[in-house]
Image (cartoon, rainbow, N blue to C red):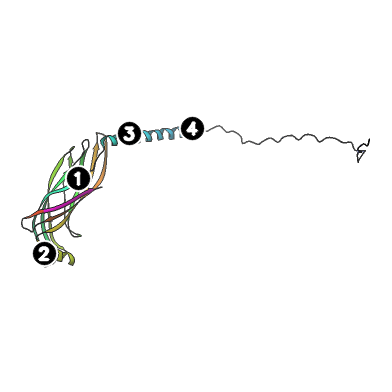
C-alpha cells in the first residue's frame, strides 16, 4: 500500500487551534433619570385631564344641543325718503327687530349689537342697541329708528331709487352684527359673533308699510 508522504518531513503537522468567539460590545446600561420619570408622569396626567375635560364638554354639548339665535324684522315703516339736490339721499325708517332664542335649555345674552341700513351697497344709517339677555324659548321685540342725512349715492342707485319711488316699492337691506353668549348651565358658556341680514321692501313715504322681507342669520 502506498503511504502519503509529508512534503516537509522535518516539520510536524499540528491542527489549527479553535478561534475564540468575539464578544458583542453592548452599550452600557444607564439608569433612567428621575426627572424623566416625573416628566412622563406629568404628561400622562395632563393628557388624561385634557381627554376627560373634552369628553365632559362633548357630553354637555350633546345634552344641550345649542342652536343659534335668530334675527328678524316683524314690521317696518318708511317715514321719509327723498333725494336732496338730485343725488343726496335722506331717509327715515323705523323697524321692529325681533330676536328669538329657539333653545329649550340654553339662555342667550346679546352684548355688542349694531344694526346698519343699506340702500344698494351704500351704508346710509347705523344704530346701536342696548345689550340684553334672552331666556329659554324667549323672544324680544326692539324698536330701531334709522335716519340717514344727505348720503351720496352712486349714479346707478340714484336711477334705481327714482324708479322705485315711482313704482311705490323701495328696497333696503338691514344688517346686524351681534356678540352673542350662550349659557349652558351655570359654569359653561361660550361666545361667538352672529350676523343677520334682512332684505325689506316698503311702500312710499310718509306712511310706507312693509310689503315683503327675507331674513337670514348665520355665524
Describe the element under mark 3 as helix, strand or loop.
helix
Query: Of circles 4 and 1, which is in front?
Result: 1
Expressed as whole percent of the image width and height from the top left, the position of residue 183 reads: 24, 37
Q: Residue at x 15, y 52 (%)?
A: 213
Residue 172 occupies quadrant: bottom left
| 128 over 55 or under it: above or below | below
User: Which residue is denoted by mark 3 in the rendering?
Assistant: 56
> How far from the left and from the top, in percent, is residue 12?
89, 36
Q: Are marks 2 and 3 in contact (CB under 8 Å)?
A: no
Point out residue 155 in the picture as x, y percentages from the top left corner: 17, 67
Q: Residues within 10 Å of mark 3 (few under 14, many from 20)?
A: few
Q: Nearer the viewer, mark 1 or mark 2?
A: 1
Residue 130 is marked as none
In the image as oriented, which residue stretches furthest toward the right? Answer: 1
Q: Which mark is residue 70?
A: 1
Q: Mark 3 or 4 closer to N-term?
A: 4
Residue segment shown in magenta: 211-219
Residue 63 horizontal/vertical position (percent): 27, 34
Horizontal arrangement in the rendering, residue 206 relative to residue 195 (left or right): left
Residue underneath mark 4: 37
Looking at the rendered image, the disc whose residue lies closer to the viewer, 1 or 3, is: 1
Q: CA distance from mark 3 to mark 4?
A: 28 Å
Q: Name the one closer to the observer, 49 or 7.
A: 7
Amino acid at each position: 500500500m502506498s503511504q502519503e508522504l509529508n512534503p516537509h518531513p522535518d516539520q510536524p503537522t499540528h491542527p489549527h487551534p479553535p478561534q475564540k468567539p468575539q464578544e458583542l460590545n453592548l452599550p452600557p446600561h444607564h439608569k433612567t433619570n428621575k426627572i424623566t420619570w416625573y416628566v412622563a408622569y406629568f404628561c400622562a396626567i395632563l393628557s388624561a385631564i385634557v381627554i376627560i375635560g373634552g369628553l365632559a364638554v362633548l357630553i354637555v354639548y350633546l345634552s344641550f344641543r345649542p342652536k343659534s339665535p335668530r334675527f328678524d324684522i316683524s314690521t317696518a315703516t318708511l317715514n321719509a325718503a327723498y333725494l336732496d339736490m338730485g343725488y343726496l339721499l335722506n331717509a327715515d325708517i323705523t323697524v321692529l327687530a325681533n330676536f328669538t332664542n329657539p333653545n329649550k335649555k340654553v339662555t342667550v345674552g346679546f352684548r355688542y349689537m349694531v344694526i346698519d341700513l343699506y340702500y344698494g351697497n351704500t351704508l346710509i344709517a347705523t344704530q346701536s342697541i342696548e345689550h340684553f339677555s334672552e331666556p329659554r324659548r324667549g323672544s324680544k321685540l326692539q324698536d330701531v329708528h334709522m335716519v340717514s342725512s344727505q348720503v351720496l349715492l352712486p349714479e346707478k342707485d340714484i336711477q334705481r331709487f327714482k324708479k322705485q319711488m315711482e313704482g311705490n316699492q323701495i328696497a333696503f337691506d338691514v344688517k346686524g352684527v351681534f356678540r352673542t353668549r350662550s349659557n349652558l348651565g351655570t359654569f359653561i358658556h361660550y361666545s361667538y359673533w352672529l350676523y343677520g341680514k334682512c332684505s325689506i321692501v316698503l311702500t312710499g313715504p310718509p306712511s310706507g308699510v312693509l310689503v315683503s322681507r327675507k331674513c337670514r342669520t348665520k355665524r
